[in-house]
Amino acid sequence: DIQMTQSPSSLSASVGDRVTITCRASQSISSYLNWYQQKPGKAPKLLMYIASRLESGVPSRFSGGGSGTEFTLTISGLQPEDSATYYCQQCYSTPLTFGGGTKVEIK
Amino acid sequence: EVQLLESGGGLVQPGGSLRLSCAASGFTFSSYAMTWVRQAPGKGLEWVASISASVSNTYYADSVQGRFTISRDDSKNTLYLQMNSPRAGDTAEYYCAKGGRLEPFDCWGQGTLVTVSS
């Protein structure tokens, strides 16, 4: 099974800050890495797919990168509405696995 | 508009059975893989099972293999999860999602809560 490790598990940042979340896969997954945002009591929402492709309707302050085993999600210019938990997920092979999540709080 | 609407959740006794449904609309259901993802209270996301389009190949997490069955009825645009012999550890919010292997989950339902307790 491919293990997905996210870091940090939580962070606190100010409005306007640049925030980066890292996701590492236990083996190469090419670019089959997706990022989701989940707010309390809500279903997850797709932000990025195939590592760096922005889902339609998602603000351009979100960007993704990486390939192989190391990936990043960056929020450039953090906004209050970005307070949420972010999950990475590999869709390269079953079992399809998620990272443990990164909770982003606004100072 | 793409929509997924889960139903069928509730309280079930350990060892019982429950069937979840997910009604899809706004897209050609038969052309897409579909997936169930769950989230235990206060925990992260866990993939449960996926079913491919067309030939309906199925894939399961080890934690549910042999107890849960994913299926689809393309004539009704509906995805199912048959949960047999549930355990307390299966208590979670269950989401259906459009997508599967090599595809992102680009649309999610609102979730249905399953509580396994005597």
Image: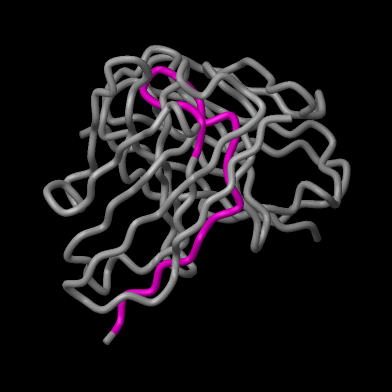
Horizontal side of residue B50 vs B64, given as left or right = right
> Which of the pair A96/B7 is nearer the observer?
B7
Q: Nearer the viewer, residue B39 or B99?
A: B99
The magenta region covers: B97-117
Q: Quadrant of residue B52?
A: top left
Q: Is residue A82 above or below residue A51?
A: below
Q: Position of residue B4 (x, y in %)?
A: 59, 41
Horizontal side, residue B99 vs residue A48: left or right: left
- Write the residue at 50% across / 37% down: B97
Residue B109 inside the magenta-drawn segment = yes
Q: Work out whether residue A90 or residue B96 is closer to the camera in this orientation and state it.
A: B96
**Quarter-of-image position of residue B47:** top left
Residue drawn at 22 percent across, 51 percent down: B68
* Residue at far front of view: B75
| In magenta stretch: residue B28 | no
Residue A29 placement, left or right of A36: left
Question: In the picture shown, does residue B98 fall above or below B118?
Answer: above
Q: Residue at x 31, y 63 (%)?
A: B18
Q: How many marks?
A: 0
Residue at far bottom of view: B118
- Left or right: A23, with B46 as reference point: right
Q: Does B86 appear above or below B7?
A: below
Q: Position of residue B35 (x, y in %)?
A: 40, 36
Q: How is the image coloured?
A: one colour
Q: Residue furthest left?
A: B66
Considering the image in quadrants, where does the C terminus of chain A appear?
bottom right
Residue B16 spot, x, y in % from top left: 21, 71
Q: Residue at x 56, y 28 (%)?
A: A72
Percent x, y for residue A74? 68, 31
Quadrant location of the N terminus of chain A in the rendered image = top left
